[in-house]
Structures are given as C-alpha cells and as structure tokens.
Image: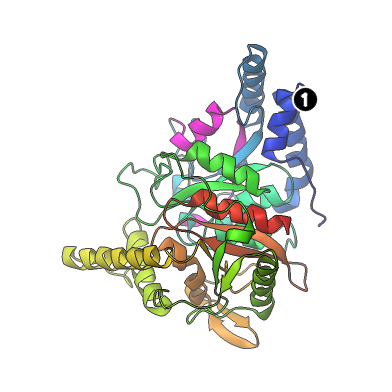
Amino acid sequence: MKLASEPTAIETAAMVARGETSAIAETEAAIARIEERDGPINAVVVRDFERAREAAKAVDERFARGESGPLLGVPMTVKESNDVAGLPSTWGMEEHRDNIAARDSPSVARLKAAGAVILGKTNVPPLLADWQSYSPVYGRTGNPHDLARSPGGSSGGAAAALASGMVALELGSDIGGSIRIPAHFCGVYGLKPSYGIVPLEGHYFPGTDGADIPLSAVGPMARSAEDIALAIDLLSDIALPRPRCRSLNDARLLVITDHPVAPTQSAIAEAVTDVAEACARAGATIERQSGRLPDLALRHGEYMRMLLTVLAARTPNPDQPPPNLPAWFEILDAQARCRREWRALFADFDAVLTPVAGITAFAHDTKEMRDRVLTINGENSPFASQFGWIGMATYPGLPAISAPIGADKEGLPIGLQIIGDMHQDQSVVELARLIARI
C-alpha cells in the first residue's frame, strides 16, 4: 500500500490560523480519508464523526472570536484505552464492551483545550498486552505497509492511522513498548514520556479508578518530531526542560546495537550504526561502550519481574503469583538502583541510541506470546526476549522516542530508539528532529 503524505498537526493548525482552511473543513477531510482508506486497515474502530463535526464548528467559532490554540482545528484520534466522554473504553475485552467513559481523561481534555478535534478511537489488543492489535471487540488491524503484518501493539491502531495519513496526531500509552513498537513497525514517531509527567487518570483498567500503574505512561504519536515536541508540552504536568543539544555538533551519544538478551536483525543493527556514523559526521561525539551502563541482562530480568507483577494485579496469572509486601519492596529497591545507574551514565552522555526492537513488523500470529518463536539472523529466539530493548527505558522510567530511520529489504520500517535522562523528554525529541534532518 502506498502511504499518503498529509500535513502535520502543526502545519494544519497554522493553515487554520491563517484562514486558509477551517476546523470543519479539516475535520471533513479527515473523515473522508478514514472512510476511504481504513476499510482494509481497520485502525479507527470507534467513530464519533457527528460529535467531531459539532466540535469543529465550536473551534471555528473560537477562532472567529479571536481565540487561538496550538492545535486549533487539528482532527485526531486517540487510543481506545484513553477515556473520551461518551465513548467505550473496553481495552479490547468483550466483557467490557459496555464500559462507557463518563468524562474525558485529563490528556484528552488538554488536547481539546488546545483546539484538537477528536474523531474517534483506534484499535488495541485485549488488556493492551500484545505487539499486535487484534481484539474480539473490534477485529484485527493491519500494517499499512503490508496488511499481512502487525502494526504493533498495543497502540497499533494509532500507528496505522498515522502511517496511512488518516490523522496527524494520536494519543497512545506504553508499558511494554506499546507506543514505541507500533511507531517502529509503521514508520512514525512515538514518545514514551518520563514516568509520571503525563496523568494516567482516565487510562484505567475498565471498572477501576485506583492508583497510577507502575511503569505505565501515556504519550503522543505523530508523523513529525515537531508535533511530538508540541504535544508533550501540552500533556505534561510539569514544565519540561528545554533540549540539552540544539545541534548534533555538541551531542554526546552512546550507541548500543547488541543486547545480551534481545537478538537483533542485522538490517536493524546496521541502520542504527549508519545513523551513528551520520551523527559523527555532523560533529557528534559517539561512544560504543561505557563502564557506567547498567548490566542489561540483570536489569532486563528485574524489569520483566516487575512488569508481570503489575499486569497480574488486574488479571491474576497462576504462573506469576503475586509477591508479598517485602518482595514488592525488593522490586522497588532494584528499580531505584537501576534509576541511579542511569542517572550516573547521563552525566557523560546526552542520549543513548539503540534499536527499538530486534525485529521489524512480523506476520499476524494467533499463538499466545509465550509460544511465539522468532527467527533472527537464521536462529530461533523466544518472542519475549525482544522486551530487552524496550525495558531499557521503561524500567527506570526514562523518556524514549521511536524515530523512523529507514526500511529493510522488504520495505518494512525501521525505528531508532533515543533514550534520555529523566525529564529530558524534549532532548530526545530534538535529537530525533536533528537526526531526521541529516
């Protein structure tokens, strides 16, 4: 499928602000794109077009009164698990088909306040717990680059809607790569923010309204780094520091292409290496190793233990009995030690460049994740080993962006993961923008 190239969110808002178009015109155009393109993809699974038209008219009335907004008139969609008043938040589970949100999540409310128009919601797998996006509620989403392949998960519908040009901006979530993997598989941008800076309220497991989920983050996805930079400022609870580097000439980058747990396709490792070499030519300082890098195998095991514990809290797993209180504090202590290790490393580096995953988009697979086997560089590997790359940023709660850097020989997108220090979200986004320019 040939992917469309449509204006970015910032470009759309600028055209509305100049009077070259209107919110209702852009909303109608986005609705037409969804109706024309989404059939075989099945990304926008909850459609709220009539209310979107009313919201667009209200935005145009705001503009006529002299009001402005950074997303004025920008039509967008959000991941199904983010609450939008009046729409279902099923998390892909049949038993929660009738779970209708009473109010917008804070993130959705902030996007609307900035002038965005919400067209509907995009597909997710059950429990948000897969790198595919199939659910018994909404069916299967295909990758716009190859419909026989996964768009990623759990924000797979979000990435597919972006990659196909239906919308310019999306709101996803990430606990095990659920923003970064779809961005990598579909060739778009996706930011997992620093833990805790974007409210998790309104992104609750259906029927609950408790404490924030450890490790989990809500964040933006888009087709440009500039849109990500704008969106994370709108979504964040704190005033984020400005980027450490405004050019590659003063960037200090640690590049990692080998992971002790996660095998990586040669094409992906080579693409990351090519980016590192291009950065070096642009003046960046590139290092391939550091004595301060945490033990990746050790920390991966600790991350998986914490992740499975968190997931089992809502859906008990007999293979993963819940820890007692002292054991849970041991998990938190290990996470704290990992965070301190990364803080020490970022005294020497502005960012770490790695693969997002060791694989590109795989063919749809109905087997349980624990039963899947991948063939990487001619050798079989358990599917779960691929969480090694993702956990590097998730476990210590660090910001990480997936940025498109090319494609493999089959034309499947390859993403670059850029990891930064805590609250340096704008730094990783700016590096993604600078790398795109070269």
Residue 297 located within the stretch drawn in magenta:
no
On screen, 180 above or below 28?
A: below
- The disc labelled 1 sits on which kind of residue? Thr
User: Badge 1 is on which residue?
Assistant: 21
Residue 46 lies, in percent from the top left, at 60, 40
Q: Is residue 363 visible?
A: no
Q: Is residue 90 left or right of residue 146?
A: left
Q: Is residue 131 left or right of residue 54?
A: left
Residue sitting farthest toward the top: 65
Question: Range of the magenta residues?
Answer: 103-126
Residue 136 lies, in percent from the top left, at 55, 54
Q: Quadrant of residue 99?
A: top left
Residue sitting farthest toward the bottom: 379
Q: Is residue 180 left or right of residue 18?
A: left
Quarter of the image for the N terminus: give it: bottom right
Residue 381 lies, in percent from the top left, at 54, 83
Q: Residue at x 58, y 44 (%)?
A: 229
Residue 104 located within the stretch drawn in magenta:
yes
Q: Residue at x 76, y 21 (%)?
A: 19
Residue 36 lies, in percent from the top left, at 79, 42
Q: Is residue 18 visible?
A: yes
Q: Circle 1 — which element?
A: loop
